Image (cartoon, coloured by chain):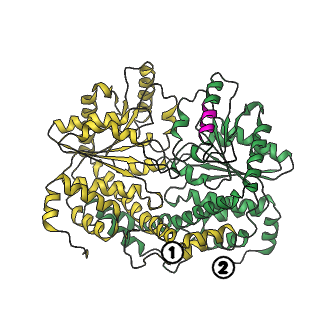
Chain colours: A yellow, B green
């Protein structure tokens, strides 16, 4: 497929050689969406598919940002170029980001071999899943491997974003109560590795027993793979090597059992879904909000002159119907 | 706007008079989507907008289903017809529903004045938010007031569903650790009432102090309304009257300060969004999955012959472009 946007070739060469400045610019282009993003991703797509993608999630207080930090440094010290995508599903109501997490990640961001980028939620233009997928594609295409996707908190949006990962790691810590219970819808079901961080705290043994039991119960689901339960104390760097080894073992398992193909298929579906969502929901709503049309339609629905389906029909007249995708709302 | 589907008029009259059998059928029609649903919701829309909509959410283990049960009976005993929409965001991976909750609700379901319906997640056809909005519209239009929307668990999808509620109640219980922290993105920000259930357990005082502090901190956000902290012991029926009174006080506050209009505006936007999502994301994906097209496109993306945006473009040729919304995927 051809794209009308020409990318400067010297810039593109620098990008695919892995230089950090054009990489930062490329991620900004991908985040904005639109024709330029589409052209860029179109050119990079065939270079992607190399990186091992690690998902790390866990409840607030599990110390997963520190863990991601140490893990990124560990891989980088092996001579690998490590990409980190930190997903901040900021509240739709406050718009606030979890700044503390970013600050704690600074040790890795100073490392030559590590590139960190946040994917923030942007209200109506949302597209957090789309942005994450595109960030991973770009990092992958320019030679970052592994790529760590860190998600903050718990919920359906996390599950959506998580579909990008080959090796999903669930991080727990002692003293968080039933927090892992709150994750059970979708997150636990795809975990490949359990990690108990803050393993020096009391109650770590109880958590370990509990996670081992969950691992045993999951055996039917993952023939040939027993979910390991790894203990770390990330802020002292302990257990990071064991976690990295477990991740490597899972990567080998995926390759040797031919599961990588099925995972890539699922990931492709998630990407297609995210693209539809951006083009037909997020962008039209953002445009209609800017033009004042959304306000008028919402008022008509609220005053019961019109129902929501008819309002959505009226709004879709603003959707491009020539099949073009990735239109920017900017 | 005209609709091509004729609804049997005796059936429709029975429905709007509040009879339970046609109501159950109407909700099934709404759930299925398509032209019949659109015609039904189109006819009912102008009758809606009367009910007070109460949202109840809280972490697993907070006993909120028991609380919803008792609250529904309390309102029904005042001669009101009470609708309950129980939202089950079943895992996209297991498809399993939280059956325990439904069983615990059985006391209210036996009450003449209470009508309970679950809105289950349905994989690709998803549309949980759309289904919830439509269920509430139908119950509202046929005379149910109040309507209680109960959400299970925590996460972005809950926040989306929650936008339907006039009075969002967050339920907590002692002994759940930091569970309320996991809810902070979006849920706490819109809470109107805090409820500590299982108030006879140790640690209830600590939870109460914590929630009172949150309430104090939220005062700037809700001028004229101080979030009350109500203690209940739902399985003994204690505190239910106080909770109902707090809900009534919040309804009066919304009316007297003219905030109901702004809330209805937000709710209309959420409904329009849910309608777009169903029509342009969920239904096209479900159709493409059935026809085998999604599999072929996903394979092309996974093997890097095509990128996701181009695959989404190819898939949208299956989206009706005449502006019709609410097409069923069935």
Callout 1: chain: A
- Residue A314: image location, x then y, percent: 56, 76
The answer to whether marks 1 and 2 mark residues whose Cβ atoms lie closer than 8 Å is no
Regarding mark 2 in the picture, which secondary structure is present there? loop
- Residue at the image position 44 percent from the left and 49 percent from the top: A89
Q: Dot 1: within a 10 Å radius of its alpha carbon, few (fewer than 14), some, or many (20 or more) residues?
A: many
In this rendering, the answer to whether A284 lies above or below A195 is: below
Magenta segment includes B273: no
Q: CA distance from mark 1 to mark 2?
A: 18 Å
Q: Is residue A145 left or right of residue B264?
A: left
Question: Residue under mark 2: which chain is it in?
Answer: B
Question: A124 or B216: which is nearer to us?
Answer: B216
Residue B3 - label: 2
Residue A4 in which image quadrant: bottom left
Q: How many marks?
A: 2
Q: Is residue A275 left or right of residue B326?
A: left
Answer with the quarter of the image where residue A195 lies: top left
- Residue A316's label in the rendered image is 1
Residue A279 percent location from the top left of the image: 42, 68
Q: For the C terminus of chain B, give its image quadrant.
A: bottom right
Say few, some or many: other residues with alpha carbon within 10 Å of mark 2 (under 14 / 14 to 19 / 20 or more): few
Decide which of A65, B313 is in the foreground and name it: A65
Residue B70 visible in this rendered orientation of the protein = yes
Give x and y (percent) for residue A313.
56, 75
Query: Taking A277 as reference, is A25 left or right?
Result: left
Compared to A143, does A235 lie above or below? above
Q: Which residues are magenta?
A: B210-217
Secondary structure type for disc 1: helix
Residue B83 vs residue A237, the one in the foreground: A237
Q: Is residue A225 visible?
A: no
């Amino acid at each position: 497929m051809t794209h009308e946007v020409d990318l400067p070739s010297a810039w593109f060469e620098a990008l695919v050689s892995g230089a950090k400045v054009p990489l930062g610019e490329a991620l900004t282009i991908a985040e904005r969406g639109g024709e330029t993003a589409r052209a860029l991703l179109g050119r990079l797509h065939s270079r992607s598919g190399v990186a091992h993608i690690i998902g790390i999630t866990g409840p607030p207080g599990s110390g997963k940002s520190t863990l991601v930090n140490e893990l990124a440094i560990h891989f980088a010290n092996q001579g690998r170029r490590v990409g980190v995508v930190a997903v901040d599903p900021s509240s739709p109501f406050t718009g606030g980001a979890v700044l503390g997490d970013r600050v704690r990640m600074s040790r890795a961001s100073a490392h030559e071999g590590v590139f960190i980028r946040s994917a923030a939620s942007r209200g109506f233009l949302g597209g957090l899943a789309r942005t994450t997928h595109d960030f991973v594609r770009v990092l992958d295409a320019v030679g970052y491997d592994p790529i760590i996707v860190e998600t903050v908190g718990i919920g359906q949006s996390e599950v959506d974003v998580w579909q990008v990962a080959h090796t999903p790691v669930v991080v727990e810590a002692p003293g968080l109560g039933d927090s892992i219970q709150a994750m059970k819808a979708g997150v636990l079901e795809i975990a490949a590795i359990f990690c108990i961080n803050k393993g020096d705290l009391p109650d770590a043994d109880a958590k370990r027993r509990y996670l081992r039991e969950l691992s045993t119960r999951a055996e039917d689901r993952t023939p040939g793979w027993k979910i390991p339960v790894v203990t770390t104390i990330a802020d002292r760097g302990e257990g990071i090597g064991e976690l990295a080894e477990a991740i490597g073992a899972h990567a080998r398992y995926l390759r040797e059992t031919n599961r990588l193909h099925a995972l890539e298929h699922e990931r492709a579906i998630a990407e297609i879904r995210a693209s539809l969502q951006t083009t037909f929901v997020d962008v039209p709503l953002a445009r209609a909000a800017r033009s004042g049309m959304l306000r008028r339609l919402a008022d008509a629905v609220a005053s019961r002159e019109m129902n929501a389906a008819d309002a959505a029909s009226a709004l879709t007249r603003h959707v491009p119907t020539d099949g073009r995708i990735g239109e920017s709302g900017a």
